[in-house]
Amino acid sequence: MSLANIRSLVEVAVNDAFAAMTPAVPVVFQNVQEEPPGQEYVILNLVYPNLTQPIICPEESNIEAIVGTVTLVCYVPRAQGMKRLEELASVGCQTLNALKAQPDPNNVRFNLGAIEGPITVLDGDNPLALASVTAPFTAKG
């Protein structure tokens, strides 16, 4: 199992879903862009807090399933209502939930846990409002 294969499956699906919106919404990937791409965008974050699981056979790699967390943070301009922010969060939730049925050339079997969010943040003097969507996942392959 390659972490890059898991990342590719998620990044391609999320990028395609937000690119299909009108207007298209850019997705910021980890360790790629340094500056936000404008007033409306999504940040995709994947973390792997539990990479191995103990197993009985000593010759095994202990990597039977990879456990991770995926987070999407959606940004839109403030003071324009919640509609666009909720649209972005909904697209994110639907896209993540559909990954378990997504065909993948690398044969990654992706299973999403319960989605938490969208959680909105409208505090402070930041000119952008944000909504975050987070879910645990397991991946095998």
Image (tube, rainbow, N blue to C red):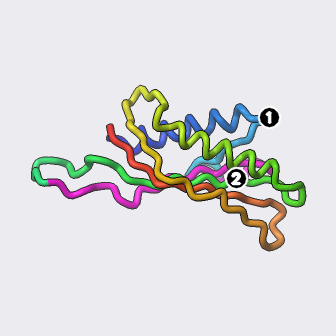
Residue 35 lies, in percent from the top left, at: 71, 54
Tell me the residue at 11%/48% (across/down). 59
Q: Residue furthest front?
A: 114
Instruction: Let me know if residue 10 is in the magenta part.
Output: no
> Under tag 2, what secondary structure?
strand
In percent of the image, x 32 and y 37: which residue is there? 141
Q: Which mark is residue 41?
A: none
The percent coordinates of residue 128 (x first, y second) are 80, 60
Q: Is residue 31 visible?
A: no
Amino acid residing under circle 2: Cys
Q: Residue 74, which numbered label?
A: 2
Q: Which residue is disc 1 drawn over?
A: 22
Residue 87 drawn above or below residue 51 = above
Q: Which residues are magenta?
A: 34-55
Asked which secondary structure carries label 1, the reply is loop
- The amino acid type found where label 1 is placed reads Thr
Q: Using the image, determine if residue 83 lies above or below residue 132.
A: above
Q: Is residue 54 magenta?
A: yes
Measured from the top left, where is residue 27 in percent x and y? Answer: 66, 44
- Taking the spot 67% from the left edge, 61% from the top edge, the residue there is 119
The residue lying at 66 percent from left, 54 percent from top is 34
